[in-house]
Image (spheres, helix red, strand yellow):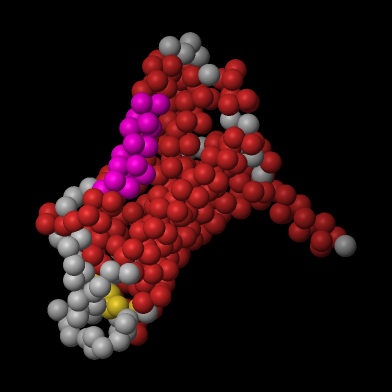
Amino acid sequence: MENYNQTSTDFFLLGLLPPSKIGLFFFFLIILMFLMALLGNLSMVLLIVLDAQLHTPMYVFLSQLSLIDLNYVSTTIPKMAFNYLLGNKSISFIGCGVQSFFFVTLAGTEGLLLTCMAYDRYVAICFPLHYPTRMSKRVCVLMIAGSWITGASNSFAHTVYVLHIPFCQSRTINHFFCDIPAMMTLACMDTWFYECTVFASTIFLLVLPFIAIVCSYGWVLLTILRMRSAAGRKKAYWTCSTHLTVVTFFYTPFAYTYLRSRSLRSPAEDMILAFFYTILTPVLNPIIYSLRNKEVMGALRRVIQRICSVNKLTQLH
C-alpha cells in the first residue's frame, strides 16, 4: 500500500485502476461508459418530459430512475478520473462526506422507487379499473417524494455518524469512492453496533422492498397467465420482465455487499461490485427500458419530428 502524508484530515482513495497501460485502457473504457450513461439517462429524462404521451406514472418513475443513475455516475466517476489523471488520490474530509451522503441517498431512493414501479405495474395489470384512482397524480408525487425523503434521511444519519467517529492514523480508503463500509475499516473503535444499524437499514431499504417486489410480480404473473389476449399477455410480460431485470441488477450486488459482515468482505470484491452498480447498471438501464419498447421508440420519433419541424419553420422565416 502506498504511503501518504497522514497529518492532514484528507482521505486518500487507492482507486480502481493500476497506474499502467492496462489501467489506462480501462480508464478510457470507464470514461466511454460514463459518457454513455450520461447520454442515455439524460435522453430518457428529456424524452419523458417532452412527450405528453409518456406522462404516466410508470414513465414518471422511470424518469426518476434515470435521474438517479445520472447522479450515480456524476457522484463517483469524475473524482475517480480526476485523481487517476493527476496521480492525486486525496479527497477532502468534507468532500468525502458529501460523496457518501449523495451515494447512500441515491441507493436508498432507488430501492424504494423500484418498489413503487413494481406496485404501479401490479395495480395496472391486476386492478386495471382501479388504476386511475390508486395511481393518481397526487399518489405518484407522494410516492416519489417519500422515496427521496426516506433515502436522504437515512443517508444523513449514516453520514453524520461516520464522520464523527475517530479514525486511526491511516486515512487510506481501499476503494475508488468514499463508500461507508470501506471507511469503517479505518475506525479506531468497535463498530459492531454501527454495523448492526447498516444491516438494519439494508433490510429496510433493500430486503423488504425486494420481497414486496417479488410478491407483487408473483400476483402479476398469475394475472398474466389468466389473460385471454395474447397481445396483452406479451405486453404485460415484456414490461414486467424488463423491470425485473433492472431490479436484479440493482439488488443483487448491493445486498451481497451490505449484508455481509466486515470479516467476509475483501476490498477487491467490493470494488468490483461497486463498479457494477455505480457504472455498469446506469449504462444498461436506459438500453433495457428502451430496447423493444414501442412507446419509448414512438416518443423518440415524435420528438425528432417535432424538432425537425421547428428547424424547417426557422429556416423558412
Q: Position of residue 122 (x, y in %)?
A: 47, 26
Please say whether residue 212 is one of the residues in the magenta stretch: yes
User: Which residue is nearer to you in this view: 167 or 54?
Assistant: 167
User: Which residue is nearer to you in this view: 136 or 158?
Assistant: 158
Q: Position of residue 74 (x, y in %)?
A: 45, 65
**Residue 280: which quarter of the image?**
bottom left
**Residue 268: which quarter of the image?**
bottom left
Compared to 113, does 238 lie above or below?
above
Which residue lies at the image location 57% right of the left edge and 51% below the top edge?
A: 45
Residue 311 visible in this rendered orientation of the protein: yes
User: Which residue is nearer to you in this view: 119 or 22?
Assistant: 119
Specify the segment rendered in magenta: 199-217
Q: Residue furthest right?
A: 317
Which residue lies at the image location 66% right of the left edge and 44% below the top edge?
A: 51
Which residue lies at the image location 31% right of the left edge and 39% below the top edge?
A: 207
Compared to 124, does 263 lie above or below?
below
Q: Is residue 316 left or right of residue 88?
A: right
Q: Position of residue 26 (x, y in %)?
A: 29, 69
